Amino acid sequence: MSYVDLHHSLKDWPYEPDKISVRKILGSDGSVRIQMRVELGIVQMEAESRPDGTRPFGSDSLLTYYRKRLAKHEQANGTPLGFALTPQECNMIRIEASLFYRRYVAYFVLEEFDNVIKDTAHSLALFDLCRDYALEAEDRATLEEFRPYVLMMHARGRAYAALAESEPASALAHVNRGVMEIIAQYERLGHPEAAERSDELKILRELGRELNRQVPRDSILVTRKALRDAIDQERFEEAARLRDKLDRLYPNKNLHPDKNLHPNKNLPPNAA
């Protein structure tokens, strides 16, 4: 086996402490790969499937593998009850989540926002697996502290993708949804007061303020659209918050343009 000295590659691409440096290259096999310059070298990732290029248990990712296992369990038992992930399996899931973290950060720098959306969605689905099926309480909770950051990156990816399509109203809707999801996460964790100290919320709210200047009637139009989407997709807790926001925007209910969406009858009792 021969080894390659990276001295010249590192010299040609110097490390900059205050900058995330990322580039795409064409591999010797013709595949596109992503490289990130770090302090002690270069990290290289695959552009598709798992960033490290491995196929765990013959699948393109652990998420795919465990989803298949869960589906087989449900088919055999008629319920997901009884499906569980061991501490070792949860550790492998955390490792995969860290790989996707590196890549969606790289994609964000490259401004490939569709890929940011895809990789953050993958990470959130991994978080869900551990939260819902881990045997140990510690494994169910470990990734949850990182959920606000991934929700923020997912929202930013969606917002910037919408801006690329000249849709600032949609971009603002994605930001507002991200804000509400992060607040809801802190509430689930039992620390609602921590939301006000959240750097993730500060970043999204600043982006929201920038978008506000691009959308003349954003507060009403975007909230109405988000409310319709939340009800259609049965995200009732989010719909309740949006309904309350419209209440504040329309103190005179007779002038409310979405009276058919506004009443409590559109939401289940526990969301009113």
Image (cartoon, helix red, strand yellow):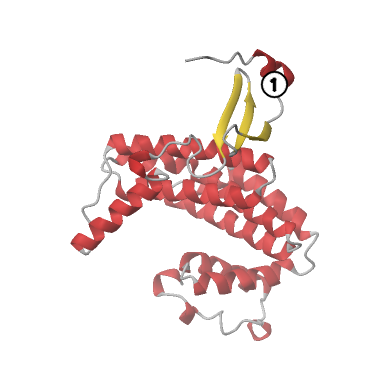
Q: Mark 1 highlights which residue? A: 15
Vertical order, 36 against 8 (above or below) = below
The residue sitting at 29% across, 36% down in the picture is 87
**Up-down: is 75 above or below 128?**
below
- SS label for mark 1: loop
Q: Residue drawn 59% across and 84% down? A: 259
Give the vertical position of 205 relative to 137 (above or below): below
Quadrant position of residue 249: bottom right
- Left/right placement of residue 82 relative to residue 36 reads left
Q: Position of residue 38 (x, y in %)?
A: 62, 23
> Residue 135: x and y, percent?
26, 43
Q: Residue furthest left?
A: 77
Residue visible at 63% across and 19% down in the picture: 39
Q: Which residue is at a point 35% across and 45% down the rendered structure image?
A: 130
Residue 95 in the image, given as x and y percentages of width and height: 42, 34
- Horizontal relation, residue 213 to residue 257: left or right: right
- Residue 9 lies left or right of residue 148; in this view the side is right
Q: Is residue 189 visible?
A: no
Question: Which sits in the foreground, 243 or 10?
Answer: 10
Amino acid carrying mark 1 in the image:
Tyr
Q: Is residue 105 left or right of residue 79?
A: right
Q: Residues within 10 Å of mark 1 (few under 14, many from 20)?
A: some
Residue in front for this viewpoint, 257 or 196: 257
